Amino acid sequence: MGERVVVGMSGGVDSSVAALLLKRQGYDVIGLFMKNWEDDDDDAYCSTRQDLIDAASAADVIGVELEAVNFAAEYKDRVFADFLREYSAGRTPNPDVLCNAEIKFKAFLDHAMDLGASRIATGHYAQVRESVIDVEERASRFELLRGADPAKDQSYFLHRLNQAQLSKVLFPVGHLEKKEVRRLAAEARLANHDKKDSTGICFIGERPFRQFLNRYLPKEPGPISTPEGRTVGQHQGLAFYTIGQRKGIGIGGKQGGDGNAWYVAEKDPAENTLIVVQGHDHPLLFKRRLAALDATWVGGAGPDEGSVHTAKSRYRQADTTCQVTRADVDEFSLEFSEPHWAVTPGQSVVLYDGEVCLGGGIIA
């Protein structure tokens, strides 16, 4: 048998094809299905049961073993607790970033090593490049690269991975486009070859987001105001809104103004006030600068002050050229060449040098 690799199989087509490709390459492949959420785990909103069935079906066709493991306790302690803290503070966290760092590439990695694996693999659209820096010491440097499919690249969510983690991970579909992954799955007769991609936060599923948060965070209603101080409505609690939000504010067009849609521009925790503006291109929705905390860098060291890179402050955003204006051990500040829309405290800002993902931090 070849080198043992444990593949995180979610039931989706990407991780299934990752396992398929590794099996064809001669690896000793074991599939691992991770259950990360147990509260109100029912078919109405949560797809865990069906996902496990899909993962088992794919594993059977590929000819690999599948183990199911429960990481719900670790998820609640390491990811969900932080998620609630951030929302309580009025910020908008990205739990998928933390889930990758704490669960998929920590708890999962540790479990895989216990199974005798030398590496793990996932269906992420990203790539790893290894460079030998000392032949005698067998020392290498690992770089995290964007996935080859720009529409599916997931390096943004993986920017907190470190050298030790990257040295033990494979991204078998990272060099492929999504349509090619689906084609390979169909040719291999995998039943999930046309399965819809999962969206949203894993533990919320398709349930209404505000309804979910209501069960964990208290409502603290307050005024919705324009930048000029005119009250135009009442919010349910700052935690339930995010910068750039248009739908679900509860104002409608009846409050006058220029007739354009309302957007959340700022939160004022001290006054418990939600600041809204009209129009997608309102100046208050754009920022030229941001500061970030809790920085992590793939290579270990951050960029130099004054260096120029590209960055994105949310996943579906195009890169914008920026300059590092301050660089401390775990904090940094950026200035963008063009104003950035809806910069949101709590979200991740991720820096790139061409195709190389350098790392990033949490927008303060």
Image (spheres, grey):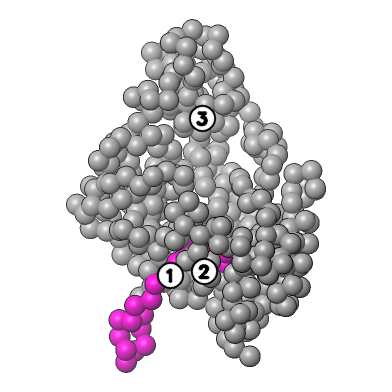
Q: Earlier in the sequence, mark 1 or mark 3?
A: 1
Residue located farthest toward the left when viewing the structure as drawn: 306
Mark 1 lies on a secondary structure that is strand
Label 2 SS: loop
Q: Which mark is residue 171?
A: 2
Foreground: disc 3 or disc 2 = 2
Are the two marked residues, 1 and 3, in contact with CB atoms closer than 8 angstroms? no
Residue under the point 55% across and 50% down: 95
Q: Which residue is mark 3?
A: 245
Q: Is residue 123 magenta?
A: yes
Upstream in the sequence, badge 1 or badge 2?
1
Which stretch is magenta?
122-140
Residue 140 is situated, as x and y percent measured from the top left of the image, at 36, 80
Disc 1 marks which residue? Answer: 128
Q: Left or right: where does residue 45 sit relative to residue 116? A: right
Of 1 and 219, nearer the camera is 1
Pointer 1 with pointer 2, Cβ within 8 A:
yes
Amino acid type of the residue tagged 3 in the rendering = Gln
Residue shown at 80%/48% (left/top)? 42
Identify the element where label 3 is drawn.
loop
Q: Which quadrant holds the N terminus? A: bottom right
Task: Give the crowd class for mark 1: few <14, some 14-19, many >=20 residues within 10 Å.
Answer: some
Residue 132 visible at all: yes
Q: CA distance from mark 1 to mark 2?
A: 7 Å
- Of badges 1 and 3, the one in the foreground is 1
* The quadrant where residue 38 appears: bottom right
Cα–Cα span, label 3 and label 2: 33 Å
Instruction: Give residue 227's mark.
Output: none
